Amino acid sequence: MNTKTTAKQHQQTTKYSLNQHIPISEPQSLEQTSLFRLHQLLPTIDSIATGTPNKVIRQADAADFVAQLPSLAENQSRIGKIYQNTRIETRHLAIDLVSEEGMVLTAKDKLIQSRMQLFKEYAVPLAEKVARKALESAATTVENNNSLHSKSSIEDAIRLIVFVSSTGFIAPGVDTELIKNLGLRPDTARVTVNFMGCAAAMNGLRIACDHVRAYPNDKVLVVCLELSSVNAVFADEINDVIIHSIFSDGCAAVVIGACQAQEAIAQKKVVIQDHFSYLVKNTEDGIVLGIRDNGITCKLSRNLPEYIKNGVAPVIENFLASHSLTKNSIDLWAIHPGGTRIIENAQHSLGLSDHQVAISWEILQEYGNMLSPSVLFVIERMLLKCQDSQSPHSVNHHQKDADITNKPLTGLAFSFAPGVGIEGILFQKT
């Protein structure tokens, strides 16, 4: 079989919807048989778990504290408005940045080596707590006598950890601690995704999906963990204030598996149907991550809202068209809650109603921008609302409740990478 034939077959098989009958022709060779069966395996989200550090900071208190810092005296009059405009009410932080102790831990002369040690100190227990929750939830899937999974426990079934972070770099790192503390197999493979910013969860999910397609008996644990507070610096720069007013700490863990289409429908699985990745032209200044002597930093261009407003719709519409879908085909919109102008301009670009993006606003209001875990917080809440009420918060407003309960729900999740890159997944709640 040559390359052109393989590519053509792959394109044809991926065009079928989950509930559509797929005509089966008699395979001409063993290679064709294996290829056909492979494309019937669907990556699934077996569980999502989320968690945050215990320290909760009210945005109003943070604004008052930062406004009194001597190093920011020149910008004092602007600080209150900056925090108020975020529409964030509370954030969870590993390091209390509205205390004298927090200021000592994040002093501007604190070397990055010390910050990375702090990252590991706070990251490992949080990652373990959230990952354990995800494994416990996914364990029921393994116990359901799934024909593809013969492993005796979820710990044995996990054969790959994908660890995602843009706020901490250390090796051996959090992934190795998780293998030890969670009782995973020592031959569990490890992949890290670093410096992809808010979109890094999408990259992690792509790696996991590729793995379970190739090894359908395996499961993959994806852990996204960000501790922006570890890298906080308050110098006499307004960008430091903006960064502190938006970013927060959090963790999300996802267990990815694989099953056949019929099994996905029978067990009401959440299926990841496809991924997309697109680098918007001439937006290199939009989101810039950097490493300084005293920590990791992020700079957001004042042009970023315009980049998003102009860039999102063409990317999303072209991707949906490749699946014979339109924006009206999407029931669930999971937009990265990166900030007020991120959500507003993505919503404007796609022509979405306030109702359709409500959960993104909820997560921003309650948690701030946690970078990579944020969109997974949105997906988790969205799926829980679907499950609990059968009337998802982000479903198209013209849908009738009766229709919601009788059909699969198609969802689209996306977030933004440095560049500006738009990364996302197409999923279906069966």
Image (cartoon, rainbow, N blue to C red):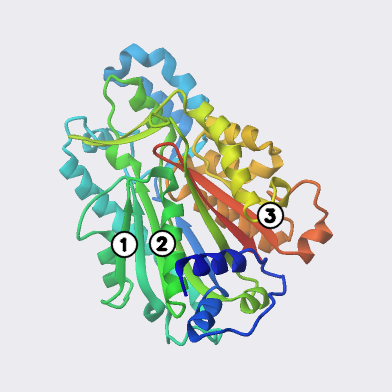
Quadrant of the rendered image containing residue 101: top left
Q: Amino acid at mark 1?
A: Val
Secondary structure type for disc 1:
strand
- Nearest to the eye among marks 1 and 3: give it: 3
Quick check: marks 2 and 1 in contact, CB under 8 Å? Answer: yes
Q: Amino acid at mark 2?
A: Ile
Disc number for residue 280: none
In depth, the one of 131 and 256 nearer the eye is: 256
> Which residue bears the numbered disc 1?
191
Q: Residue 127: image x %, image y %?
A: 36, 59
Q: Amino acid at mark 3?
A: Ser
In depth, the one of 214 and 241 nearer the eye is: 214
Image point 67% across, 63% down: which residue?
Answer: 387
Q: Mark 3 or 2 closer to N-term?
A: 2
Disc number for residue 324: 3
Q: Residue 371: image x %, image y %?
A: 42, 44
Residue 45 vertical position relative to residue 332 in the rendered view, above or below: below
Quick check: marks 3 and 2 in contact, CB under 8 Å? Answer: no
Q: Residue 156: image x %, image y %?
A: 37, 81
